[in-house]
């Protein structure tokens, strides 16, 4: 190809769209996978944590939700450039390896394989169980059954998994939109978007600190926007559809989250929301639906929450095994992880993922899992966003079908914002942060063990 004439053989291989996997994911399918992962149970209860962290200032709450979307979009734009340039399964493994050193790419994938991916799925399954008051051992059993079922289903092929994702995305959005429209039309709460905390007890009292802390809470609801790049080898025309799917998904979900929370505030007076949260009732969407539709509204929200969470779990189960598959193909991981079944699915990686999921379900609590996953992903996001500038310098001739809007300014802004949030997370929960850093250090050690073995074999 004319555009590849100045590339080395290695760079041409990176830019190539050739794959042994099946390209069956359309632009809509890609956006649906991201929406399926991102829109989970978080939209129904995280608004309560955002309110507590801002002292029940609805103006600051809305600002935090907007900033969460902006932070995600900034990162998404950078991922879009990298994914269109290097349309390979595994995503971050390749970007970090080419920008810095192969051990850094492996480290990120190792972290995702051991903690990030199974931790996200385990947390999602436990959240699903808690939605229906299944707690303790019963909740863990329900989460276990759900994860086993979705693993078996996704072994049938990416086409089936993607189709279910498309269906659940539509199914989960409809109840949310019904509540959103009805709440906006009903109104009557008398709330205002004040930037002054109504109940400042327990907060730092610092405007910027409260907004930053609240924004971190929203990021769990936005979590998942990085995952389309892990199935880049199964996206049709990835150089066009991958960036478009990322931008459409993050943009649409940001608008949806902000409107959904605003709609709840239109229905429930601030004093009532404060009372609900203080009494441990965090699912404000359910309370809003009760006010609008009565008991039928509560049922509608329950169905919407269940579909949301099931769709999210399915999408994560589908996407995540592609990273260890790429690690094995690259040569620094167990060869068995690179095996695919007759349906072109990395089956061994998916089975191992299930084992890790079940282990985390039975040894960790929901809040511990979410904190661990978010902090580790923040570190990786900073490195990958920085890789955009590094690769522009190292590989200036690589075709870039999509380039980040705003150029270097956008990239640097994304790095600064993510660093600030990462430091804030470290200060708020140092134990979890240390565990996350420790896992990454272990990943580097594992890389060099495999690297020494490959060199010994003369590869």
Image (tube, grey):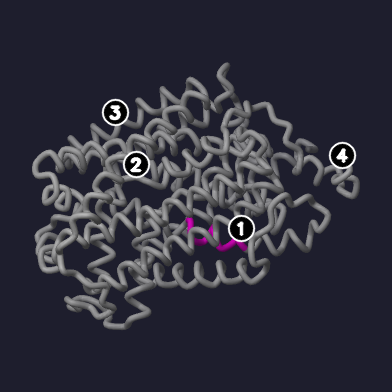
Residue neighbourhood size for the residue with mark 4, other residues' Cα within 10 Å, grouped as few (<14), some (14–19), many (≥20): few
In percent of width and height, residue 442 lies at 53, 52
Residue in view at x 29 percent, y 44 percent: 363
In the rendered image, the residue lying farthest to the top is 342
* Residue position marked by numbered label 3 in the rendering: 145
Sequence order check: which comes first, mark 4 or mark 1?
Answer: 4
Sequence order check: which comes first, mark 3 or mark 2?
Answer: 3
In percent of width and height, residue 226 lies at 52, 49
Sequence order check: which comes first, mark 2 or mark 4?
Answer: 4
Give SS at disc 2.
helix
Q: CA distance from mark 3 to mark 1?
A: 37 Å
Q: Is residue 231 above or below residue 420?
A: above
* Residue position marked by numbered label 1 in the rendering: 78
Query: Comparing marks 4 and 3, which lies closer to the viewer?
Result: 4
Q: Is residue 184 above or below residue 130?
A: below
Magenta range: 377-385
* Residue position marked by numbered label 4 in the rendering: 1
């Amino acid at each position: 190809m004319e555009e590849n004439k100045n590339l080395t053989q290695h760079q041409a291989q990176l830019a190539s769209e050739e794959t042994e996997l099946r390209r069956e994911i359309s632009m809509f399918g890609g956006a649906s996978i991201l929406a399926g992962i991102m829109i989970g149970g978080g939209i129904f209860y995280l608004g309560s944590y955002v309110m507590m962290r801002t002292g029940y200032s609805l103006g600051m709450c809305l600002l935090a939700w907007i900033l969460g979307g902006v932070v995600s979009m900034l990162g998404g734009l950078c991922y879009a450039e990298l994914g269109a340039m290097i349309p390979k399964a595994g995503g971050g493994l390749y970007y970090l390896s080419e920008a810095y050193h192969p051990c850094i790419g492996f480290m990120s994938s190792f972290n995702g394989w051991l903690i990030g991916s199974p931790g996200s799925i385990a947390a999602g399954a436990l959240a699903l169980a808690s939605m229906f008051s299944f707690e303790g051992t019963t909740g863990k059993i329900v989460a276990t059954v759900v994860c086993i079922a979705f693993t078996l289903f996704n072994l049938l092929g990416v086409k089936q998994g993607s189709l279910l994702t498309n269906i659940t995305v539509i199914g989960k959005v409809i109840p949310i939109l019904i509540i959103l429209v009805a709440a906006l039309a009903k109104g009557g709460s008398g709330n205002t978007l004040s930037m002054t905390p109504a109940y400042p007890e327990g907060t730092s009292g610092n405007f910027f600190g409260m907004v930053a802390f609240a924004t971190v809470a929203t990021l769990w609801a936005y979590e998942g926007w990085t995952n389309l790049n892990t199935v880049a080898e199964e996206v049709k025309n990835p150089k066009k559809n991958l960036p478009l799917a990322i931008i459409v998904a993050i943009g649409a979900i940001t608008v949806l989250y902000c409107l959904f929370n605003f709609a709840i505030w239109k229905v429930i007076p601030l004093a009532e929301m404060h009372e609900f949260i203080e009494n441990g009732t965090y699912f404000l969407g359910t309370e809003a639906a009760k006010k609008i539709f009565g008991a039928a509204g509560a049922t509608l929200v329950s169905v919407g929450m269940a579909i949301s969470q099931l769709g999210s779990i399915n999408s994560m189960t589908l996407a995540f095994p592609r990273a260890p598959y790429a690690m094995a193909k690259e040569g620094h991981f167990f060869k068995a992880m690179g095996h695919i079944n007759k349906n072109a699915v990395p089956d061994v990686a998916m089975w191992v993922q299930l084992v890790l999921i079940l282990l985390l379900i039975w040894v960790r609590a929901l809040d511990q899992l979410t904190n661990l996953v978010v902090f580790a992903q923040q570190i990786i996001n900073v490195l990958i966003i920085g890789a955009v500038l590094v690769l522009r310098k190292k590989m200036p001739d690589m075709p870039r079908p999509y380039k980040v809007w705003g150029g270097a300014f956008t990239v640097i802004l994304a790095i600064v914002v993510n660093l600030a949030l990462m430091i804030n997370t470290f200060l708020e929960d140092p134990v979890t942060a240390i565990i996350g850093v420790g896992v990454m250090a272990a990943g580097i050690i594992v890389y060099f063990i495999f690297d020494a073995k490959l060199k010994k074999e003369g590869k």
